[in-house]
Image (spheres, rainbow, N blue to C red):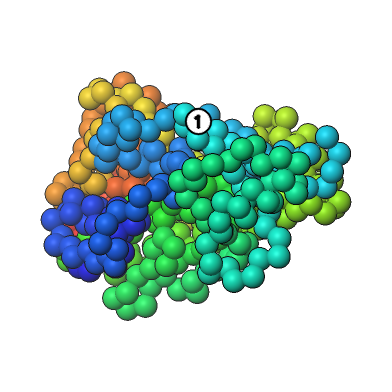
Amino acid sequence: MVVAGCGPTGAMVAAELRLHDVRVLVLEKDTEPASFVRIVGLHIRSIELMAMRGLLDRLLERGRRRPAAGFFAAKVAEIRGTDRAFSLTPFGEKVYRVVVPAAGVGDRAEPPTLEDVAQRLRAIAGTDFGVHSPRRLSRFGDATRLAERYRVGRVLLAGDAAHVHPPIGGQGLNLGVQDAVNLGWKLAAQVRGWAPGTLLDTYQAERRPVAADVLDNTRAQVELLSAEPGPRAVRRLLAELMDLDEVNRHLIGKITAIDIRYDLGEGHDLPGRRLPDTDVAQDRLYDLLHRGRGLLLDRTGRLTAGGWSDRVDHLADPTAALDVPCLLLRPDGHVAWVGDDQQDLDDHPSRWFGDR
C-alpha cells in the first residue's frame, strides 16, 4: 500500500494500516519536518481518536489544554466603533498569533514580511504592538474546494487532497485525521481480503458530507468576519444567540465533530454516532480499541461475536455505563448496532466485518 504525503492525515492512514499488518510505503517530498506548527490544536473528536489508539498520553505530555468554546467565527477585536477587525491571540509564553486582513495583495505566492503585518496593524489598530521575531508568516484566503469523488478505483483521497477551506475554526487537520481513521480500517479490510463489497464505498458516503458541512461553516464564518455593516450586524446577533447554551453546544458540536451521525438507516438514534469514552470493567472503553478492531460491548452476558471473533472483540460487562443493553462498535468508535437479540446481532456484522 502506498500513502502519498506524510502530513498528519497520511501518517494516520499509515498507522491505521499497520495496526492490521498491512505493509505501507509512505512517500513524502519534504526531507525534513517543518520547523513550525501549522495548526492551532486537536479538537475533541480527534482527541478521542488518539485515546482510542493509545496515543493521547504522549500528546498530552507535549501539548496544552484549551477550553472548547468561543471559536465559531473566531474572537475578533473590533477597534472602540471602527469597521475594521483583527485578532491577537496568546499562543504560548510571550508568543502570539496575529491574524490581520490583507489589503492590496499582489502575488499571493509571495510570503508576507514582518513589515507587511506591522503596517496592517498600524492601519487597523493604530499600533503594531511592537511585533518582532516572527516564527512563521503566511497568507490564507477564503477558497473552498471539495473533491467530487473520494475514490477512483485503487486511488483514494483524504485530508487536504479531498477538501480545502479557510483555516477558521482550526478544522482542517482534524477533518483529515478523522478521514484517516474512517478510511484506515476499511482499506485494511480490503487488503486483507475480508471486506464486504460495499465497505470502501462507505468512506465517501460518510466522509464527503462531513467535509461539505465544514466547507459551509467556514464560508459562514468568513462572511461573519467581514467588516461590512450587514455581516457585522449578523455577528452581533450571533454573539447574543451564543449566550444560549443550546446554541453554543450546537456550534461547538459542529466544529469539533462530536455531533456527527453517519446514515446507517432507520431505527435507534445511536447507530452512526460516535460513542464517548466510558467506564467499563477493564478501566476505560477506549483502552479496548487500541488494536483497531470492532468491539461487542454486552451488558447482558448472553451475546457472542461468533464467527467474527478474529475481527471483533467481545466484552461482557453488566456494569458498563450505557443506556442500551448491548452495542457493536466499529474500529473508528462509531456505533454499528444496538440491541439485545443474538439473531438481530448476527444480521449486522457482515455489513462491516465481512463473512464469518
| Residue 17 image offset from top left, x and y in percent | 22, 57
| Residue 241 image offset from top left, x and y in percent | 76, 36
Q: Amino acid at mark 1?
A: Lys
Q: Would residue 258 appear left or right of 354 to someone viewing this image?
A: right
Q: Would residue 121 appear left or right of 15 to someone viewing this image?
A: right
Q: Nearer the viewer, residue 159 or 99?
A: 99
- Give the residue at x 39% y 38%: 47
- Give the residue at x 86% y 51%: 229
- Give the residue at x 71% y 60%: 103
The image quarter in which residue 296 lies: top left
Decide if residue 252 is in sight here.
Answer: no
Residue identified by numbered label 1: 94
| Residue 136 image offset from top left, x and y in percent | 47, 50
Residue 124 vertical position relative to residue 144 in the rendered view, above or below:
above
Residue 144 vertical position relative to residue 231 in the rendered view, above or below:
below
Decide if residue 33 is in sight here.
Answer: yes
Q: How many marks?
A: 1
- Give the residue at x 50% y 30%: 94
The image quarter in which residue 194 lies: bottom left
| Residue 215 image offset from top left, x and y in percent | 58, 59
For mark 1, give the secondary structure. loop
Quadrant where the N terminus sits is bottom left
